[in-house]
Image (cartoon, rainbow, N blue to C red):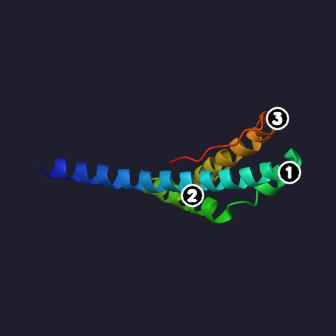
């Protein structure tokens, strides 16, 4: 019985921390959607967009990295491993926007926010 309760507690804690990291990822992505849409509407060139995107949504990016680091450390990663993983994940989100920008320009389309 104690083992079952321990596993239930661990599952609940894990689900909560995953939700926190997931929520932070969505917040960062949605901020980049707004940033990208503003730049598309202003007809900013691809190179200028890429340069500006690296400094966009810094608070949301920091929150995502912090949430992911927390999760990784709870799963046994070292500080440096957790930092590296979280930064790579945030870089991946950013890359998806910088890599897609030219496509948005050429198709006159816009990114869509996540729920």
Could you give the CA–CA distance between mark 2 and mark 3, rounded to whole angstroms?
30 Å
User: Residue 75 location in percent, x, y?
Assistant: 43, 51
Comes first in the chain, label 2 or label 3:
2
Front residue (pair 27, 1): 27
Mark 1 and mark 3: span between their CA atoms?
A: 12 Å
SS at mark 2? helix
Total numbered badges shown on the rendered structure: 3
Q: Residue furthest left?
A: 1
Q: Position of residue 89 (x, y in %)?
A: 61, 48
Find residue 52 and report its image quarter.
bottom right
* Residue to which mark 1 is pinned: 44
Looking at the image, do the residues carrying marks 2 and 1 touch, with CB atoms under 8 Å apart? no
- The residue carrying pointer 3 sits among few (fewer than 14), some (14 to 19) or many (20 or more) residues within 10 Å by Cα, namely few
Horizontal side of residue 44 vs 59, given as left or right: right
Q: Position of residue 69 (x, y in %)?
A: 53, 57
Name the residue nearer the viewer: 63 or 40: 40
Residue labelled with disc 2 = 64
Cα distance between the residues tagged 2 and 1: 27 Å
- Residue 104 visible in image: yes
Q: Is residue 67 above or below residue 108?
A: below
Any mark on residue 106, and which? 3
Q: Are marks 2 and 3 in contact (CB under 8 Å)?
A: no
């Amino acid at each position: 019985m104690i083992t079952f309760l321990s596993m239930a507690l661990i599952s609940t804690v894990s689900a909560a921390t995953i939700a926190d990291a997931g929520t932070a990822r969505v917040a960062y992505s949605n901020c980049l959607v707004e940033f990208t849409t503003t730049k598309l509407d202003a007809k900013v060139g691809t190179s200028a967009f890429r340069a500006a995107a690296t400094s966009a949504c810094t608070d949301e990016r920091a929150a995502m990295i912090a949430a992911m680091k927390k999760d990784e450390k709870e799963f046994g990663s070292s500080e440096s491993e957790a930092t590296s993983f979280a930064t790579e994940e945030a870089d991946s989100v950013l890359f998806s926007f910088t890599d897609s920008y030219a496509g948005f320009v050429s198709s006159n389309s816009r990114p869509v926010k996540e729920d």
